[in-house]
Amino acid sequence: MYLLTRLIVILSLFISLPGFGEPFSYDTKKLDVNLHDHAALFASKDNTGFPDSFKTIENWSNRLDILPSTTLFSGRYWLVMELKNNTEQEELVLYPYNTVMSSIETRVYHRDGEVQRYYTGGKNPNEFAFHYGNTIRLLPGESYYLITMFESDFFYTPTKLVIKPVIEFKELVVRENLIMVLCFGVGIVLGLYNLLIYIGSKDTTHLYYAIFTGVWVFAWSHFFHISDQLFGFYSAHLHWLGFALAPIANVLFYNSLLKLKETHPNLATLSIWVGVISATGLPFCILFPGFGFLWATVMTGTALCLGMYIGVRCMLDGFVPARYFVLAYVAMMVPNMIGNLTNLGILPPSTLNLYLLGLTGIALDAMLLAFAVADKFRLTSEENIELNKNLESKVLKRTYELEQLASELRDASEAKSRFLANMSHEIRTPMTSIIGYADGIMLGDIKPHERNHAISVILQNSRHVLGLINDILDMSKIEANRLEIELIEANLFQSIAHVESLLGKQIRDKGLEFELNYHFPLPDYVVIDPTRLRQILLNLTSNAMKFTTVGKISIEVRCVDEKLLICVKDTGIGMAKDEQKELFSAFYQADSSTSRKYGGTGLGLNISKSLARKLDGDIDVESEVGSGTAFTLKLGLFTTEKTRWLTSFEQVNQSQIAQEQPLHTQDELNGDILLAEDHSDNSRLIKRILERMGLNVTTVENGQLAVQAVLDNEYDLILMDIQMPVMDGEQALNFIQATGCSTPVIALTANTMRHEIERYMKLGFTDHLSKPIDRAQFNQKVSHYLNIAVDDELDLPDEEFEALKQQYISGLYEQKVQLQNQVKYQDLDGLSKSIHAIKGTAGMFDCEEIHQLSADIDVCLKTDEIDDIESKIRALITAMEHAISQAECDKAG
């Protein structure tokens, strides 16, 4: 109702007809009086025309119906009034203002019969530029009848009709036209300017600004007769086209200007919906101009209020350009509100051109928005400058980091070069002994009674090379962050005593003293990775032995502040402070002379420190040149429920004696083990090792027989090879699990890559043992799953092992022929299986060269690197022939 009240013109219903009252007296006091409010208004019929003369007006008007009100939509009506010119001016201007109509026709009747005719409106040529109005002649002191017909497709606002002096009106036209030209000029210039900026910068804020100004210039041009007076084109259906598009253009502009998507996404979405909804009414605005007036008024008002709210929010958020935006909206809303309230009658009538007032407000709005855009551009420029500064700073920082990295890479390259040189020395030295003794045995230079010593030397040096390889592999795992530890319950004294058993004799043979000192109280059982603990202590003690020529080496064990401290001291050459800083770096050695004189890879201490940190500890070093070195291993101390704190050596010995007692008597060691292994030599060897533990062993040759054995009997532990004929280990496990068997199944495999082992665990294997079998690990896992005590050093007698080895080597001839045929006929699948079998078996019988060569070929086959595979297989066959020849020589000797 509020909106309709604003739009419907309430006109006077009962105005005295001419002749029944005094004529309206026009004088200098009534220059701006709205004649529309003092005249009689009549509805017009389609066939009704103007009266023919002054005398017929009364009869003519009696046939008309009084007009109750104008309609919002199309129509026409008559205005009739009697005028008397009480001024001295003869020429005056009849001016319909603040209205837009299709046609306005006026006739002035005089008593002497003279009739003046005048035409104005959108469809008629106008006498005054961009203004309605006609110059009329009214003789001073004379009375006239004024009859005007208003015809239009709409009646938006109350019609205003005044009579002004010609000179005054012409001055008004000049002033208003100047203001109009300035306002439209501001819009056009700013719009084109921002469009050019957009073309250069691609900043959409400038594009939306140009669209916004273009829309309002187009919209307001119809209210100032631009199209009809400049181009001779008039259409009421285009009046509200621009105003229906204004909300969406405005919304797009301030969304970009105020960065609403980043700061207020919900308001951004709401504003876009307002713009879209406004645009959906566009077809109806074109078809029905009256509806267009209602629609545009509602939607532009909604968009203005929402935009003002958003602008204030952004200004309060501290976005500087928003202040200009808010001022612009105030400049646009105030004049338009004045016009609206005047039309509603809330404000008193005014002779101001309300359309011009609205146009001025929108032009001022455009100027202030241009300031907002410029302010945003300034902020963006400052941000870009700051960004460039930050970028330069980052570039300098990154350049410095790259220089540092380059320096580190050079150092690493030099370190690795030294490492390769050291490795060459470390590997060539034991390999010289291995090859020399092996050649001597093959050529018969080694006498029969010296062969055991030669084999011992070969074995010792082979294990040394294996240790070097393990160090390199550990280093690779550390760099890949894949080095893992296994925390279990372990006897602390046994783990440390293992170091003494391995290195104590070597230290004393070198002429050095060796002491192992326990500072009680100490726990007997701790949670730790005993293998890694021994690896660290062996490394530290080996280093001490390497760099000590006189004096002694001691190991001190104590517990302080819930930490286990093991200190390895020596009286060796010591080192300077700067050497200590780089001591734990990979590949580090004090200088080239150190590696030449003492050997080593430069990896041991780095690996040891990494292991210590994995065990919740660290390694510290104290040293002086010429006075020896002390490495202190600090580990987290974690005890168990069975831990006892021992206070003397007697308690340690008693504890060890108690531990040496088996958990079960020999009569109770009736553990039944199923061994599934297709290679007969491996099967015989593993079976003998298990039988040495006092276990009953059933052997089968493939997975199918293993499944049948599980169905026929119950076993305490199953050792399952993975690659077997008929049915492999993975298939057999699936069938065994299907039977409901809960017996632990350990995978025996030469595949030792981490991802392969993880896959076996996911398939359901309880654990895994890699080939060649590590005796200590093998004994540990068997004892763990059978809950029996097994001597860590349990091994086959040399004579029995040599017999099994000779039997294995005697079968190499057949395998050699098989390899040759597979290479000849390019049977890569069969070759892969044969190589895998040789790899797993050769290591079991200490045939290290055959094992290493087959392992290399196995990797090449898995990675499809078969370019030089034939040369590698020839080397393997040669190694097999050497082993066969050596076995025959031993047998003949």
Image: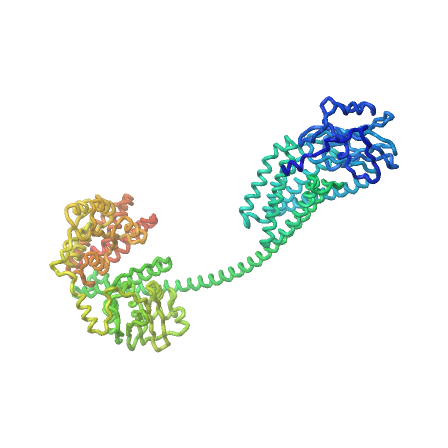
Q: Position of residue 393 (x, y in %)?
A: 55, 60
Q: How is the image coloured?
A: rainbow
Residue 462 figure quarter:
bottom left
Q: Residue at x 56, y 41 (%)?
A: 273
The C terminus: image quadrant:
bottom left
Q: For this rendering, which residue is in front, 812 or 319?
A: 319
Q: Residue furthest top?
A: 47
The N terminus: image quadrant:
top right
Q: Residue furthest left?
A: 667
Q: For this rendering, which residue is in front, 670 or 876?
A: 670
Q: Does residue 622 sit above or below 587 in this rendering? A: below
Q: Does residue 363 sit above or below 397 in this rendering? A: above
Looking at the image, residue 174 sits to the left or right of residue 501; the answer is: right
Q: Position of residue 551 (x, y in %)?
A: 29, 77
Is residue 891 in sight in this rendering? Answer: no
Q: Residue at x 23, y 65 (%)?
A: 642
Looking at the image, residue 320 sits to the left or right of residue 506; the answer is: right
Is residue 612 in sight in this rendering? Answer: yes
Q: Position of residue 630 (x, y in %)?
A: 33, 73
Q: Residue at x 72, y 24 (%)?
A: 45
Looking at the image, residue 428 sits to the left or right of residue 308; the answer is: left
Q: Does residue 633 sit above or below 354 in this rendering? A: below
Q: Residue at x 20, y 66 (%)?
A: 453
Residue 67 figure quarter:
top right
Looking at the image, residue 254 sits to the left or right of residue 221; the answer is: left
Q: Position of residue 81 (x, y in %)?
A: 79, 30
Residue 159 figure quarter:
top right
Q: For this rendering, which residue is in front, 742 or 175?
A: 175
